[in-house]
Image: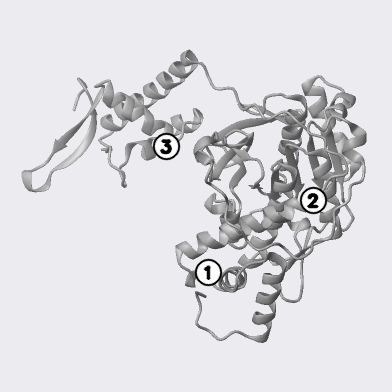
Amino acid sequence: MPITTEPLTDWDRYEIARLQQETGLGLNDAQLLHHYRNGPMRHMYSHELRRCEALEDRIAAKHAETVIPLRMNDNGSSPQARRGPTAIPALGQAEPLAALDISNWDNEEVPQRDWAVRNRIPRRAVTLLSGEGGVGKSILTLQLCCAHVLGRDWFGSMPEPGPAIYLDAEDDEAELHFRLEAIRDHLGVTFRELDDGCLNLMSLAGKDAVLGVPDRAGIIRPSELFEELMRTATNIKPVLIVLNSAADLFAGNENSRSEVRQFVGLLRRLGIASGAAVLLTSHPSLTGLSTGSGLSGSTGWTNSVRSRLFFKTSETDDGGKSDQRELIVRKNNYGPTGETVRMVWRNGLFVPLSAPSSIERAIAEHKIDDLFMGLLARFSHEGRKVSDKTGTNYAPAKFAAEPEAKTAKCSKEALADAMRRLFTAEKIRVQEDGPPSHRRSRLVIVGGVS
C-alpha cells in the first residue's frame, strides 16, 4: 500500500501514471517509488526503502538492456572500435516487472564481487571521491586511469586491467597534457603506449558538460551528452569511467535528496550498461572539511553511492599543511571501510609514502621515550605533578607544550604512545599521595626520587 495518506495532486497522478507506463510497475510500486523520489523519506519504513532501492536497480538494469552497441568489443583494444559511433534505440514502453527466476541457483556458481580496484571501487556502481579544490583529485584519478590501462599498481592495490575513460569538465587539453606528462615520465612509458592501452581523455572545459538536467517536475533527464557518453562507453567497455566533477556535470540541486538520487541512478545506469566503475569527483562543504566527513549537500550523495572516498591533505604537528595526502575509504557497501592510504606529492604526481622499517621505527620510538622520561624527571624536580588521566594535568598534553617537544616536533599523540610503552616496560608508574579522603595520583619514574 502507499506509504502516505496525503491526497494526491493532479501532478502526482500524472507522474505515477507516467512511471507505470515507462517502467511497467504496478500501481502500488509506482506510488511507492514516486514518494521515494519526491517525498520525505523519513515517513518511509526500512523495508519500503529497500524495496525502492531494488526497484531503482531493476529499472537501471532494464534501461541498460536497451543499449545495443554497434560492435561488441570486450577488451577495448581497437581504437576504431572504441571511437566508432553506435546507435541506441529510443526507449519504448517497458515490459511488466518480472521476478527473477532463482529456481536453478542451487546449480549455479555464486557470482564473485566484481571490483575495478579491490575493496575500494566496485564495478557497475558509482563511487564518490570528494576532496577540497587543489588537493589533487585530478592527478590521483589520472594515475588510476593509467594504472588500469597499463596493468600497474595503484597505491598498494592492483586495478583490473582494461580501458579507461577520463571525462574532465575543468581542465583543457593543454593542462591534461601537462599533468599526464609527469605521470608518463614517472611510469617510463610513452603516450602511444597509453593510447594503445585505450586511455580515453575527454576535455569539456568551457563547454556544456551537463549530464543530468531536472525538468519542471524535478525529474532528472539525461542530456544529449549523457547519451553520447553512453554510446561511447558501451562500445569501449571500460573498466573505469572518471567524471570530473559533480559541480559541472549535475544541473540539479545538490541539496535535493530526490534529484541527487536520480542523478546517481543515471550514472549507475551508465556503469551497468558498460560494465564500468563510475568514479564521480566532488568538492566537500566547509562543514564536510572541518568534520573530516568530506560531504556536501544532501545526504542523498553518500546514501546513493556504493562506495565513497575522501582525499585530504595531511596536517603537520603544528596544524599546518604538508605535501602528504590521505585517501580514506569512508563508505564501502561491498567491502571494508576505514582504510587510509598515505602518499606524498613529488614532481607533479603522488607516490606512496614509504613506511619506516622496524629498525627505524624502534629508533624513533626510543627517542620519544627518552624525551618523555626526561620531561617527567624535570617536572618532578620542579614539583609539577602530571597524570596519566586526561585532564588539566595530562602528561602527554603538558609535555607537548614544552620547548623540547616542539623542537623535536613531537605531538601529544606520540607522547601518549610513549607513555603506554613506558608503562608496559615498567619504567614509570602511578603514585598516590594525600589523606585517604582526598587521594591524588601522579606519574613517577620507577626507582627515581619521589
Earlier along the polypeptide chain: callout 3 or callout 2?
Answer: 2
User: Viewer-nearest of labels 1 and 3?
Assistant: 1
Earlier along the polypeptide chain: callout 1 or callout 2?
Answer: 1
Residue 41: image tag? 1
Q: Give the structural element (helix, strand or loop) at label 3.
A: helix
Residue at figure coordinates x 56%, y 86% from the top left? 7
Q: Give the structural element (helix, strand or loop) at label 2.
A: loop
Residue 328, position as x, y percentages in the image: 56, 40
Residue 40, position as x, y percentages in the image: 54, 73
Residue at figure coordinates x 82%, y 48% from the top left? 68
Residue 252, position as x, y percentages in the image: 73, 66
Q: Which residue is mark 2?
A: 67
Q: Is residue 312 above or below residue 210?
A: above
User: Viewer-nearest of labels 1 and 2?
Assistant: 2
Q: Is residue 268 visible?
A: yes
Residue 175 in which image quadrant: top right
Residue 438: image tag? none
The C terminus - image quarter: top left
What is the C-alpha distance between the residues marked 1 and 3? 43 Å
Q: Nearer the viewer, residue 299 or 355?
A: 299
User: Which kind of residue does numbered mark 3 sit on?
Assistant: Lys
Residue at figure coordinates x 68%, y 65% from the top left? 23
Residue 307, position as x, y percentages in the image: 59, 46
Mark 2: few/some/many CA within 10 Å (<14, 14-19, 20+):
many
Residue 343 in which image quadrant: top right
Q: Is residue 287 visible?
A: no
Residue 412: image tag? 3
Q: Is residue 82 above or below residue 50?
A: above
